[in-house]
Amino acid sequence: MKPGAWRLALRIARRDALRAKGRSALVIAMVALPVLGVTGADVFFRSATLEPAERVVRTMGQADGQLELIDRGASVKQAPDPGDHSYLAVNPKYETKDGAAPHYTPEQQRSRDTEPARLARELLPPGSTLLTDSPGPDTAASSTEGLLTTRTSEADLTDPVWHGRLDVIEGSAPTNDQQAAVTREFLNRSGLRIGDRTTVRGLESTPFTITAVVEYPGDLKGTELVTRPGTLIGKLPGGSGGSGGSGRDTAGATRWLVKLPAGATLDWAKATELNGYGFVLASRSVILHPPARADVPYYVEMDRIHGESGTALLDRTYVVILATVVGMALLEIVLLAGPAFAVGARRSRRQLGLLAAAGGDRANVRAVVLGGGIVLGLTGAALGLGLGVALVALLRTRAEEYSGARFGHFNLQPLDLLGVLLVGLVTGLLAAIVPAVQASRQDVVSALTGRDSLKPPSRKLALLGLLMLGAGSALALVGATSGFSSRTLAVLGGSLLAELGMVVLAPYLVGLFGKLGRWLPLGPRLALRDSVRHRGRTAPAVAAVMAAVAGSVAVNVYLASYDEQYRREYVAAGPPGAVILGTGYGTGTETKLLPQMRDTVERSIIALGPRADVSHVDYKGDCQDGNPCGYIQVMPPKERRCPVFDRDTDDPVEPGEIKRVMSTDPRCQVNERRGSQYGDLTAGDANLLRNLYGVTDPAAGQALTAGKAVVFDPRYFENGKVVLRYSEPITTGADGARTKPKNIETTVDAVLAPSAMPAPGQLVISPDTATRLGFTTRPAGSVWLPGTAPSDGDQQKADGALAKLTDRTVLSVERGYQSRAGLVGLGLAGFAGLVALGAAGIATGLAAADSQRDLTTLAAVGAEPRIRRSLSGFQCGVIAAMGTLLGAVCGLLPAVALRKVQGLAADYPGISPEELADKSSVVLPWPTIAATVVVLPLLAAALAALLTRSRISLLRRTG
């Protein structure tokens, strides 16, 4: 066609769009909504993705670099931007075998012998300034309700070097040792305000006055207390300025911000030099101007390790899911908008007939209908684009707070937005293609007289649809389960092909539904026969309802399957209703507070029943406050152990061999998930068996008293015995050599008692038995098993009382699995159902508008308003019923395929068959599907009958 003909077609399309404002608004809204969502997601993603210069400021503020000592005596390989732990550290003392002395390089030896800050100054350019940037340990600070767990750090916020990394957003920076700044989350959780005072546990005599609110632009949800350098971390009980208990020579990583003198720089050569001494350097100049990938040893090593196991981008699970959801959503929009264009074309039959009679060919007729798709598609896309950008700009602060990080800048990418605009245009065109082809093939005389040209459904077209349905289903399922070709293309393409096949089949299936009319009453029979006779308008409406229902069913099946997966994977911490108190990994101070904690819980929650006290079992040390201790483990019999984890030598094994054994040996494919927080080996009495494991058999309690162990997993029990493996603490000599203690195994008489929840590798003995075996015990907590679970209010009351004693207490109530679908899943399912109902109403409303002449004929022959309303309702119900039945079938395919994709992605060496089955399980929510198939048509019919006007204006019939 010539450009002039297209201009004419677009002018006619624009005039028709303005004439039928309601129908045009409907199509525009259908196109605009997904464009709005995609635009908002794109702008949000682009704005939240930091540019290198923005990333530098988040990392080091206005400094020239950030230097961190990973481990004294180690060497490091790092990425140019070592954020998110993008480095590998190797320390020779951890690589020695059989107690041999480690071999250090000169750089590693110097790192071991030199104080870290001094070594850093020696290695950096002369005149460099170091500002301590090491985070302190988590501690407890006073709040209006008791104690609040918070991070700690020290910084001179009056120094502009912190700007961009740690910003003062309210109040004034601390200027003396009695002042502090806190994050917004600290104020929200503590109930304090600027000007109030807070005390840190252990430093109650030196309270801090809150003078400012600060924020980390990259971490808006953190709870932190910031004081001036030298006023907090070094004074904390047991603190050394690090994180403590890490087992490293520096008691945790030591970190500084680096300010360079004029003319100095920190290039990649300096970074690699520092790596040899165990330092990691984030340099402003290196991040802004990174070296080639081949020149970075870290990348070379990571490519060697992960090169063969990497997954192609298009085959990653999240890409498969996202592409399938987006593709199916676009298809749904096309099918939903299709009836609007079809009705528009039928409304314009006489106009299109005049165009053909005046000499226009089929291409001209098609162009007019396609012009409607272009006009409405572009309008909807432009509207959605503008609203999406405006919505993100308007909700920017809320979005940043929800995501927990500030945007780098408001980033609008022209190419992205142009692509989104083209998606809207293509969506409008696709929705108009079928109506355009149908309109171009209509008989000119029939179009001018307003008569329908009725044709039987094409058997060839029906056969094509059936082949598309079968091929699409096979492609989606085979591609999802076997990794055939690209999983993204297989699942997305197969799902789209199957649904399009059902659309092609729709006219033929409508004809099959018509055979049911002989058994129906007058009203439904007339409605069904009318739908069959006018397949041209019925099929698009059925396809629209089918698409909406398919989306609803797919969402419900996917959410129900996901929820069932989590339900199967959930491991209870105890019997239902159990109240569990522990000290977690607390210090000896928390252990001494345990009697007070027990009394507090029993005062706060009434009718708890008998208490069972739990004790940890240790060997040569108690593992508290950084003290060394041995290791105790419950082992299965020798012949049931996985050979990968039960080797007699330290000789290295190729990763490929490990993967092969883990994938083929059933002994390695065991589900070891457990719920108890108290470890493998605990000491207690019969009350502990009952309260923590749900064992009520008196014989188990009697065996425990008699000195036997109680084991709960038959895999660990053989011939009345269970195996314990223990070893002495690891020690490090003056030369850095680590002694590897030998494992000692002993057997203990045991009984097998089934527990209320999975407890693999867990064993209970009495305190006397622990002493007899040469072990020691220490209090670990208590467990109660009341007749009914405490209310949430009782638990909150107990938590509040315990917060006044310690911030490390672990108090929980076993309430069973709590559905993860929650409000989000309910909202998605409800929204999908609402879309399906709306689609049924819209599609059948358009079809009813197209059948206005039939209603006029009924009125002319004397039909009562009730008959007309019932006919309209039955028409709507028939279309909705056919669409819901077909949609329920189509919706199963993408949901099942995506679940199989997730199961395939979760298959790793060593996963148990039960775990793998759980991750790919498919659950059909029959009540929801039944409600959709039955209730939706009834509701659509009732609404159509109620909204049909009783009075009808008589129309002139031509011919």
Image: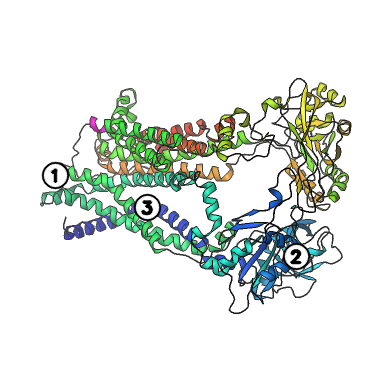
Query: Which residue corresponds to the image point at 74% horizontal and 53% vertical from the top-left?
Result: 246
Percent x, y for residue 232? 79, 65
Which stretch is magenta? 445-461
Q: Residues within 10 Å of mark 3 (few under 14, many from 20)?
A: many
Percent x, y for residue 788? 76, 34
Query: Which residue corresponds to the image point at 60% horizontal and 71% vertical from the top-left?
Result: 64
Q: Residues within 10 Å of mark 1 (few under 14, many from 20)?
A: some
Where is mark 3, residue-wise?
Answer: 31
Where is mark 1, residue-wise?
Answer: 444
Q: In the rendered image, which quarter is residue 275 located in?
A: bottom right
Q: Residues within 10 Å of mark 2 (few under 14, many from 20)?
A: few
Percent x, y for residue 670? 63, 31
Query: Which residue corresponds to the image point at 54% horizontal and 42% vertical from the top-left?
Result: 826
Percent x, y for residue 490? 39, 39
Looking at the image, which is closer to me, 524 or 408?
Answer: 408
Work out how far the residue at label 2 is from the one at label 1, CA to CA, in angstroms.
95 Å
